């Protein structure tokens, strides 16, 4: 804990804010950024002094390692504003720890807490007007680190840049979500980087997702690459399956991201007396459940989308539509989770952190 | 074929070359770049006019997709200079085709031949003094494409930048190379992006390679991620195994890069009457061969290193040293290949292309 963090960050403010140019009612996800960003460079084996400065493009050498070898990681978090105008984070320590796990797997330096967490809070204080009140309004937080050292030899960089940028956001997905269950393409290898929030994991999904989109599916649910029989996760969400009144979700592994939303929903569901079974879920169980009517719900869980109900899935050219149900667990859990995030319900877990 | 390519590229030359500052006798791979680079942007669904201009850093938005989602691909080629001062490329069409295959897998636009191949030739004409005569001297060519569109939603970019940068180079590896055969970590998934020269494939190898380095091994030979029983390739090289007098190498697949050096060596070896067997090679065969003395050679094959003899390998904590042999196939094939590349032997295959 640094008591006097302000003095440890260089702060350069914009002359005038662009906030009045932003239409907060009509935001598309991740396109508008706030006035300032946090920047901190790593060189000669040490993190330099962080700076909060105007959001703006920066120069990189054409041979920067991030361009050639994809040495880059990120996180995704949100800030929420309550009726009394205070700003809150949701389990930021989890993102901080996961970021450094990703860093280790990608051979990048650990980012200190004073830069990631204290720096984030400082940035949020400056940008507090960008966090809007009202459920559904959030400020999406994107901490990331890229290899900025130059040279086209395939080796880890010796220079890195850590940054935090902020983007006001509303819901991530809109409309009905139908998914394709992967039977050929994969997201992650055994012994690979799937559990890290590494840049390369995401672009690898673009092409198979495009093929799915062309067939009318918004997302792909990935399966294990060896057998394509076990359900893993979606592009930026973990997935839950409700069979009768039990919730199933795959255990996290070196192939699956350990989602904060996922683990929070598991705890919330258990508290509500819902039976949660964390074990490998087979595609065959899903198909079986869809056929005999025991499969009641499928939903994705992630920071951007929160909880994303899925109306049906396709597997090997057969489409299975889920029944319309009352008492959706997905929606009930989403309500409970967002109530905690917006401080509308008591946070018995101690998940929320005031900025 | 464009007859009048010069007029289709904007050319801006440096005021004075930095070539005299470069110590061509003491180059470390990939750190020095020539005076100019080729740049061509893709936006609004079309490739813009390419430009050859001074090598220099460029500006990118902090939310550029390449930083967050690793949408980036590259190629690696070389230019060679003969005694009569002409400059040659080796099978550039292969790199061009592979580049566009990588582009497709990473959901990026195809680059036109006029930009990639004609642009490269134009750039090489300007930089011809950077290609030095004498075997071992080359100009390493790095074409690459990055997603430059902004926005942190995990979707393909709509804007891209294609670039070619050039780096004078000598040998890539120096000293004895010992390798570790992977039994836990992996490079590529079934249905993944392993066959593409995608940026994310390389940074994923940094950490396991660092662990191998710490144990005294320069490289990792990857195995299939499902069973870790099949030998695949090294970080930036395909691999060959000589058992008795037969050369074995794995078939290329969606997990293994289709190397130009590999396929050229196969053709060369066949022409020399060497028996080449392209089939999955098991780790157990390697261990067996090392124990009973039938395993004579292991070598890597790739543009940067050309042919890289490997003196021994470790698998599950046992180190197997290869016998010192005369009549190394690796060295004989390397000699034949480089003789073709430097126009010291007749190019019966039609592989070399004059700039
Ligand atoms: C691959 C992947 N899975 C799951 C998630 C969900 O994780 P979280 O709930 O921490 O946002 C994300 C990201 O946000 C992700 O990128
Ligand atoms: C993963 C990988 N395998 C093999 C090779 C060898 O391919 P080439 O002979 O075309 O250089 C490379 C690269 O150059 C590579 O990156």
Image (spheres, coloured by chain):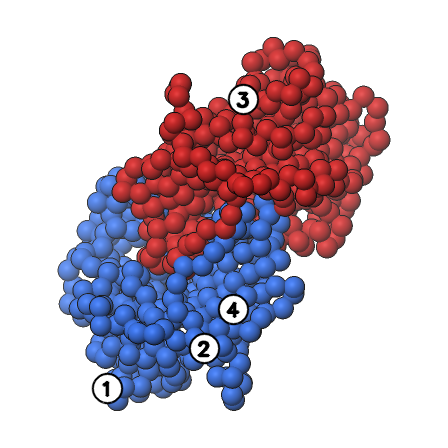
Chain colours: A red, B blue
Query: Can see residue A301?
Result: no
Please name which of the two marks, 3 or 1, marks the residue nearer to the observer. Answer: 3
The label on residue B40 is 4
Q: Name the residue under label 2.
A: B11
In terms of sequence position, does the residue under pointer 4 or pointer 1 come before the other? 4
x and y percentages locating residue A290 in the rendered image: 77, 34
Disc 2 element: strand
Q: Do labels 3 and 4 share a chain?
A: no
Query: Does label 3 point to a residue whose CB lies under 8 Å from ligand 1?
Result: no
x and y percentages locating residue A32 in the rendered image: 63, 43
Disc 2 and disc 3 in contact, CB within 8 angstroms: no
Marks 1 and 2, how far apart in space? 28 Å
Query: Does label 4 point to a residue whose CB lies under 8 Å from ligand 2?
Result: no
In terms of sequence position, does the residue under pointer 1 or pointer 2 come before the other? 2
Judging from the image, mark 1 belongs to the subunit labelled: B
Whether B35 is drawn above or below B254: the answer is below
The label on residue B83 is 1
The answer to which of B56 and A16 lies nearer the viewer is: A16
The label on residue B337 is none
Judging from the image, mark 2 belongs to the subunit labelled: B
The answer to which of B80 and A2 lies nearer the viewer is: A2
């Amino acid at each position: 804990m640094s008591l006097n963090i302000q003095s440890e960050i260089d702060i350069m403010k914009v002359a005038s804010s662009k906030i009045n140019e932003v239409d907060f009612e009509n935001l598309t996800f991740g396109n508008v950024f706030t006035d300032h960003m946090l920047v901190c460079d790593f060189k000669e084996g040490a993190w330099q002094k962080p700076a909060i400065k105007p959001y703006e493009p920066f120069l990189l050498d054409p041979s920067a390692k991030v361009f050639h070898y994809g040495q880059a990681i990120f996180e995704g978090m949100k800030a929420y504003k309550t009726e009394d105008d205070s700003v809150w984070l949701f389990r930021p320590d989890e993102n901080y720890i996961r970021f450094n796990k990703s860093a280790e797997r990608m051979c990048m330096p650990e980012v200190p807490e004073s830069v990631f967490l204290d720096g984030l809070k400082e940035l949020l204080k400056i940008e507090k007007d960008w966090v809007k009140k009202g459920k559904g309004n959030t400020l999406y937080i994107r901490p990331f680190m890229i290899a900025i050292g130059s040279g086209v030899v395939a080796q880890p960089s010796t220079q890195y840049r850590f940054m935090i940028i902020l983007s006001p956001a509303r819901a991530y997905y809109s409309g009905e979500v139908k998914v394709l269950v992967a039977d050929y393409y994969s997201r992650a290898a055994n012994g690979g980087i799937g559990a890290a929030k590494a840049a390369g994991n995401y672009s690898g999904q673009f092409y198979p997702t495009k093929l799915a989109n062309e067939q009318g599916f918004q997302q792909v649910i990935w399966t294990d690459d060896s057998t394509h029989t076990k359900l893993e996760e979606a592009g930026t969400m973990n997935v839950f399956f409700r069979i009768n009144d039990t919730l199933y979700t795959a255990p996290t592994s070196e192939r699956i991201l350990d989602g904060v939303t996922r683990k929070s929903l598991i705890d919330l569901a258990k508290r509500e007396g819902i039976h949660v079974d964390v074990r490998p879920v087979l595609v065959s169980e899903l198909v079986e459940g869809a056929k005999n009517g025991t499969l009641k719900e499928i939903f994705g869980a992630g920071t951007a989308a929160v909880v994303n109900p899925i109306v049906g899935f396709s597997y090997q050219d057969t489409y299975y539509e889920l029944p319309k149900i009352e008492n959706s667990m997905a929606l009930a859990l989403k309500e409970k989770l967002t109530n905690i995030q917006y401080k509308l319900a008591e946070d018995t877990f101690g998940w929320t952190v005031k900025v």
